[in-house]
Each structure stands twice: as C-alpha cells, then as structure tokens.
Amino acid sequence: MNDTTEGRRVQLGEDRLVEIRDLVQQLGRPDQDQAPRLLADARTALLDLLADRDDLVRANDEAAEELALWTGAL
C-alpha cells in the first residue's frame, strides 16, 4: 500500500505501476507452481488500484466543490 499524507492516501507511485504492469504480463503466461503467488499478487494489485481510484474520485469531488464555491455556483 501507499503512504498517507494528512489522512489521505498518496497516488500510486511510478514504481508500483511498473510492478503492476509486470504482473499483468506474468498473468498472461503463468507457471503452475507460481499460480498461487500470482493470484495473491494480483489481488493486492487490484486492491491498490481500487483504493487509488476511490481516492482520485474523492479528490475530484472535493476539487469540484471548491471550484463551485470559488465561482459562486454553490
């Protein structure tokens, strides 16, 4: 998982994205003995991506509200 800043998660770093992209390649041609490990890594990657997505949606909502307040739309 990622570090947090003021209670918020930090967007996935480039190194984690590279790891996830490499995992996708491994999933395309798994060895039978590596399947359980790949499944666990894939689950962790999905959780990271979903958490990052939720944080981005939340940040977008906050930015939209701040913009609406600033422009007088709210």
Image (cartoon, rainbow, N blue to C red):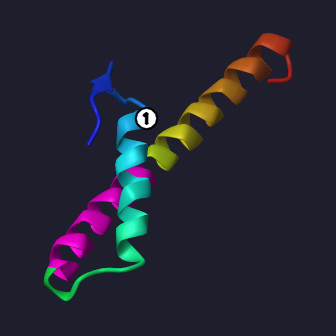
Using the image as rendered, state which of residue 21 and residue 46 is in the foreground: 21
Q: Is residue 66 left or right of residue 32?
A: right
* Position above or below: 70 against 18: above
- Please name the amino acid that badge 1 sits on: Glu
Q: Secondary structure at mark 1?
A: helix
Q: Tell whether position 53 is magenta.
A: no
Image coords of residue 46 (percent x, y): 38, 61
- The magenta stretch is 34-51
The answer to which image quadrant residue 56 occupies is: top right
Q: Quadrant of the N terminus?
A: top left
The residue drawn where x is 44% and y is 33% is 11
Image coords of residue 26 (percent x, y): 35, 69
The residue drawn where x is 78% and y is 22% is 68
Using the image as rendered, state which of residue 34 and residue 1 is in the foreground: 34
Disc 1 marks which residue? 14
Image coords of residue 23 (percent x, y): 35, 62
Q: Residues within 10 Å of mark 1 (few under 14, many from 20)?
A: few
Q: Which residue is situated farthest in the top direction here?
A: 70
Q: Which residue is situated farthest in the bottom direction here?
A: 32
The residue drawn where x is 23% and y is 83% is 31
The answer to which image quadrant residue 74 occupies is: top right
* Position above or below: 31 against 67: below
Image coords of residue 49 (percent x, y): 43, 53
